[in-house]
């Protein structure tokens, strides 16, 4: 798929990311295109400024709708405003002291809290017990009295629980409850609680499964875990040790996060230098990544979400994010999803699939069907249809066993 509006690969992908969410009312095509056209190519401050303007305009409109009793219009407008605030904040993590990070994040969360109250069904905010604190989550309860399957859904390296609204609403249509949560390194858990990423995500997911089993309307034998983007490592890593799952989905599958990041380096020896000579690595990485927008953002954001003081420290942290000696421990049926033109995690899904010894399936989305980008950006309806149908089939097979 050709870059949209921008030559800058990162800006183009983030624009496509917004456009893809028009499928579930989280953006509008005209709003995205007219905002993007005002942004200076490759200028992160310009990106932030223009998306903030659009988000604030919609936030004001939504407040007016709510005040005048137009509840449906208010919900829809708050939903888009949230997503534009999320996008406005996206490139700010190179300076963790930038006050816009807090302001935009909080404005977005305020908008989505309105969506939750106005949604049908109402989305319930939950706090999941975790170690000495809690994890934030959203519970979408299927409007049925009897117990039904429950999809536990989590994001990855840079997503949010709010951004998964469309997938959750689709799960409801398939007769499933959906619990979306944010763990260490993600969204609200990072911004408000300052919890940073950890590689052993079974320590995160097991308390979430415990919590799900305490909820009304949950069939304990039909709990499905799905992770998207880096969640394609986090979910299977957890499934290797958490065996109360009926199925696991990794979209897209990640065998080694470290190897995926290393692939972004034009010179792999520079990546290795983070371990052998970290001081030298830190001195030259800014110049080296200046012409690689995706790599530069990954390093800046990575330091932010891992709590790393230097780029080298971040690189060393992610070396633990591997499914080596873990993949074969997964016992539940597992779906590994891949996208043909995935530039962020190329080849990772197949490596993970090959390492599995459980009942497994591989689902490839292609460029020809408009779904070849990372996470099937631009083809969310197609992706959700196909993935949720796989889950439906696995649950049906579970009944026959």
Image (tube, helix red, strand yellow):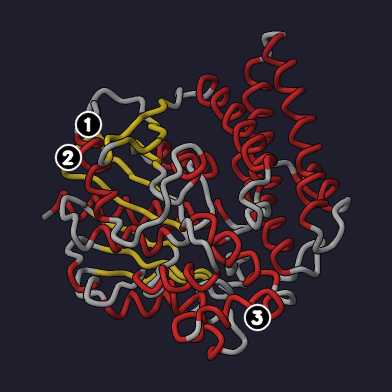
Q: Residue at x 65, y 58 (%)?
A: 94
Question: Quick one: label 2 or label 1, which is nearer the N terminus?
Answer: 1
Using the image as rendered, state which of residue 379 and residue 125 is in the foreground: 125
Q: Position of residue 366 (x, y in %)?
A: 55, 72
In this view, the residue farthest toward the front is 279
Considering the image in quadrants, where does the C terminus appear?
bottom left
Q: Residue under circle 3? A: 284
Q: Residue at x 20, y 73 (%)?
A: 328
Above or below, 104 against 283 in this view is: above
Which-is-in-front pick, marks 3 and 1?
A: 3
Q: Is residue 25 visible?
A: no
Q: Are marks 2 and 1 in contact (CB under 8 Å)?
A: yes
Q: Are marks 3 and 2 in contact (CB under 8 Å)?
A: no
Q: Residue under circle 1? A: 147
Q: Quadrant of residue 359?
A: bottom left
Q: Position of residue 137 (x, y in %)?
A: 40, 36
């Amino acid at each position: 798929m050709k870059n949209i509006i921008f030559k800058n690969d990162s800006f183009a992908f983030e624009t496509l990311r917004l456009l893809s969410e028009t499928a579930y009312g989280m953006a509008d095509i005209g709003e995205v295109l007219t905002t993007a056209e005002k942004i200076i190519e490759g200028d992160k401050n310009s990106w932030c400024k223009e998306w903030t303007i659009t988000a604030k305009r919609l936030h004001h409109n939504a407040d007016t709708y709510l005040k005048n009793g137009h509840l449906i219009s208010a919900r829809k407008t708050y939903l888009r405003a949230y997503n534009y605030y999320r996008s406005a904040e996206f490139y700010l993590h190179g300076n963790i002291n930038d006050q816009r990070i807090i302001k935009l994040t909080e404005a977005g969360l305020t908008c989505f809290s309105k969506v939750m109250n106005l949604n049908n069904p109402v989305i319930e905010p939950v706090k999941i017990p975790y170690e000495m604190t809690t994890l934030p989550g959203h519970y979408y309860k299927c409007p049925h009295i009897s117990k039904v399957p429950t999809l536990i859904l989590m994001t990855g390296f840079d997503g949010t629980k709010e951004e998964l609204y469309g997938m959750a609403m689709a799960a409801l249509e398939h007769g499933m409850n959906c619990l979306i949560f944010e763990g260490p390194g993600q969204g609200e858990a990072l911004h408000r609680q300052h919890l940073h990423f950890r590689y052993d995500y079974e320590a995160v997911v097991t308390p979430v499964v415990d919590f799900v089993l305490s909820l009304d309307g949950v069939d304990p034998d039909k709990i499905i875990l799905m992770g998207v983007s880096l969640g394609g490592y986090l979910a299977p890593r957890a499934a290797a040790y958490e065996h109360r799952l009926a199925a696991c989905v990794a979209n897209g599958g990640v065998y080694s996060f470290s190897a995926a990041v290393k692939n972004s380096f034009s010179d792999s020896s520079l990546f290795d230098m983070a371990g052998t000579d970290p001081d030298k690595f830190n001195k030259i990485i800014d110049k080296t990544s200046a012409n690689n927008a995706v790599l530069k953002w990954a390093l800046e954001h990575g330091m932010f979400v891992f709590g790393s003081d230097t780029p080298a420290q971040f690189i060393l942290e992610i070396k633990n994010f591997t499914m080596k000696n873990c993949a074969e421990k997964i016992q539940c049926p597992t779906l590994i999803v891949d996208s043909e033109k995935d530039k962020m995690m190329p080849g990772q899904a197949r490596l993970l699939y090959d390492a599995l010894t459980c009942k497994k399936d591989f689902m490839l989305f292609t460029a020809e069907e408009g779904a070849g980008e990372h996470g099937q950006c631009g083809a969310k309806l197609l992706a959700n249809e196909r993935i949720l149908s796989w889950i439906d089939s696995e649950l049906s097979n579970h009944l026959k066993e």
